[in-house]
Each structure stands twice: as structure tokens, then as C-alpha cells.
Image: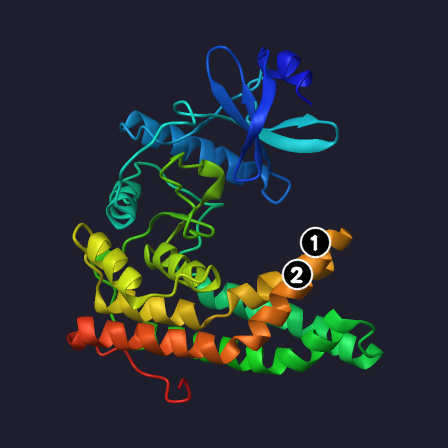
Amino acid sequence: MYQQLQSLYQLNGQRAGTYRSYDIVKTQEASYLLVPISHLDGQEIEEMAQLAEYFIHKGDQQVAGILKNKRGEVVSKAEDTLFVLLKCPYELSTNRNSSLGVELAKFHRRGKRIPFALNSLVRIGQWKTLWEKRLDQLEQFWAMKVKNQPSDEFDRLFAESFPYYVGLTENAIQYLVDTELDEQPTSLDAGTVCHHRFFNNCWDFTQFMKLPTDWVYDHPSRDLVEWARSCYWNKQRSMDKFHQMMNEYESINPLSAFSWRLFYARLLFPVHYFECIEGYYKTGDEEVKAERLHELQVMLKESDAYEKYSHDIHFYIGYRSKRNNVPKLHWIS
């Protein structure tokens, strides 16, 4: 593939390690990332490239731009793999001392001001529909697995655990519906550029880059929730850490009552479970299957602890913003 970069992009580079599992290609002039995009469609990539240009034009020095190939296309193909080539904004050894909450808030503030419309990347206002569709699809698959009887350990754990996660999902959907009925969005709730999953080390400040291939357009609470979820599964569950992140973020972008309730609805939605189950059944790689089995085993073992984490976050929200009247779910211990 690296040889084909010469014909596709007129780049003479060699592999020089990885960044977040993506291959780094280094030339004498710059560093680049090869990012496979089989999970994205062409229109999404075009909008990501447009967003990257906007952020770079506005002076964001951490955004990696998506390059066009010699045919003027943002998507290239080599060895039966669709990919995009991102130009790193600086040498990857660059160190930064930054506040994650402040950086994310500034990113969201700029993302609210994009001067053009998006279509394919828009997720704001679609959570209920997307969650219901995802639940229906997995429920049909689960019913088939139960009917055919579980054939291995993952099948058995999936069959036994799914009803519990159905309950969690239905609670999340109802909480979302009640939020949209009870609260009115404010100007603070405008859509912005977010991440599909903003995990704890998404912006590694020792090698700090923002990758447009991570982005969607959604409510800003999405990134905050997914950060909090990733902290739990990476065993960084301190409420002091959560408190610091929210303080940093709200010093730039305060959160409304609607935001906090949307935050909690998404925290209740067990996206980690859905991604684990879907990831297992979509792959043929035995090593990946083993990883997903381990993830599921840990997830089920820690279901009570995750409820406790959700309870602690609710307590924090209520303590911080009593006026917001964020309803409590009494079944969460």
C-alpha cells in the first residue's frame, strides 16, 4: 500500500509506527495517517473533509486535514482497502500541557459556528429512533439465537444477559422522551461537531491531534457522556476526576437543565453492551472474538458496579445543579 501512495498522492513515504492503531507514513516533509474508512460512506467523508478545512481555516492547529488524491477524491483504494490520508498538523512527538475539559469546550464552541449545512453526519435529535432501531435489530437476533440454542460461551452469556440490557435500553429511551417533554432546549443546546466516541485518551496530549474521521454532528453532551463511560471501563472512576472535567468544561460552556437530562439518558443507554455483542458477531477474527468474550464477561460481572457509577454521577448532577431537577431512577442502587 505504501508504494501506491506515490501514484495516488505523489508521496514517497515509509511506515513509521502507529497512532491510535492507524499506520503513520513519514516523508521528509511531514507525517501522515492511513485511516481505513469501510464503516463510513462517501458523503460522510466529504462532510468530514469540509469540517476539517473549516477548523484549520479558523486556526485550530491540532486538526489533521484530509488530503485529496491526484484524481481530486478524498477516498482512495489500495489492496482492496478503502482509506483516507490525513496530514498530521505537526510532528507526533509534540508535547502539550492542556486541560481536556477546556479544550473540548472550545472545540464545541467553534463547532457550533460552522457556516454550512451537514446531512450525513447529523445525529442530533435522532437518539430515540437510532436506539429503538438498534434494540429491535438485536432483539430479533437474540430471539433467533435462543430458538436455535446457544452453541458456545458467548452465545450463552448473550442469551442470558440480553433481557437485562433490554430493560436498561427501555429506561434510557423513556428518560429521553420525558426529557424532551419536560424541558425546553436553550441556545446552549445547539448542535455542534462531536465525536462518534469521545473516549478518555481520544486526545492524547503527548501526541495531540483531532481526527475528522472521528466526527459527527450532535448535542455537545454526547462527548461528555462517552468520556465518562470510557473512564469507567478504563478504571478511572473517581468522582473527583469527573468533577474536574465538568468544572473545566462549564467554565467555557455551561450546561442547561436539558443538557444534564440528555447526558443522563445517554449514560443509561448501554452502548458498550451493544458494541460488544455486535462486534463479536460481525467479525470472523478469532482473536477479536476472544477479546469480545472477555469484554462481555467483565461487563456482566460489573453490572452492579456500573449501576453504582450511574448513581454517583446522578448524585453529582443533583448536587451541582439542584435547579435542574434531574429525575432519579429508584431502581439504581
- Asked if residue 246 lies left or right of residue 229, the reply is left
Residue 200, horizontal then vertical, whole percent: 41, 52
In this orientation, which residue lies closer to the viewer: 159 or 21?
21
Q: Is residue 145 above or below residue 233?
A: below
- The residue drawn where x is 44% and y is 54% is 123
The amino acid type found where label 1 is placed reads Val
As measured in the structure, the alpha-carbon distance from the residue carrying label 2 to the one carrying label 1 is 6 Å
Where, quadrant-wise, is the C terminus in this rendering? bottom left
Q: Is residue 36 above or below residue 184?
A: above
- The residue drawn where x is 43% and y is 46% is 202
Q: Secondary structure at mark 2?
A: helix
In which quadrant of the rendered view does residue 119 lie?
top left
- Asked if residue 210 lies left or right of residue 111, the reply is right
Residue 284, horizontal then vertical, whole percent: 78, 52
Mark 1 crowdedness (10 Å alpha carbons): few <14, some 14-19, many ≥20: few
Number of on-image labels: 2
Residue 106, horizontal then vertical, whole percent: 24, 43
Q: Which residue is mark 1?
A: 288
Q: Secondary structure at mark 1?
A: helix
The amino acid type found where label 2 is placed reads Arg
In this orientation, which residue lies closer to the viewer: 194 or 90?
90
Q: Is residue 226 visible?
A: yes
Question: According to the image, what is the colour scheme of the structure?
Answer: rainbow
Where, quadrant-wise, is the N terminus in this rendering? top right
Mark carried by residue 292: 2
In this orientation, which residue lies closer to the viewer: 40 or 321?
321
Residue 329, horizontal then vertical, whole percent: 37, 85
Q: Is residue 239 above or below residue 9?
A: below
- The residue drawn where x is 27% and y is 50% is 101
Mark carried by residue 326: none
Q: Is residue 88 above or below residue 237?
A: above
Whether residues under marks 2 and 1 lie with C-beta atoms below 8 angstroms apart, the answer is: yes
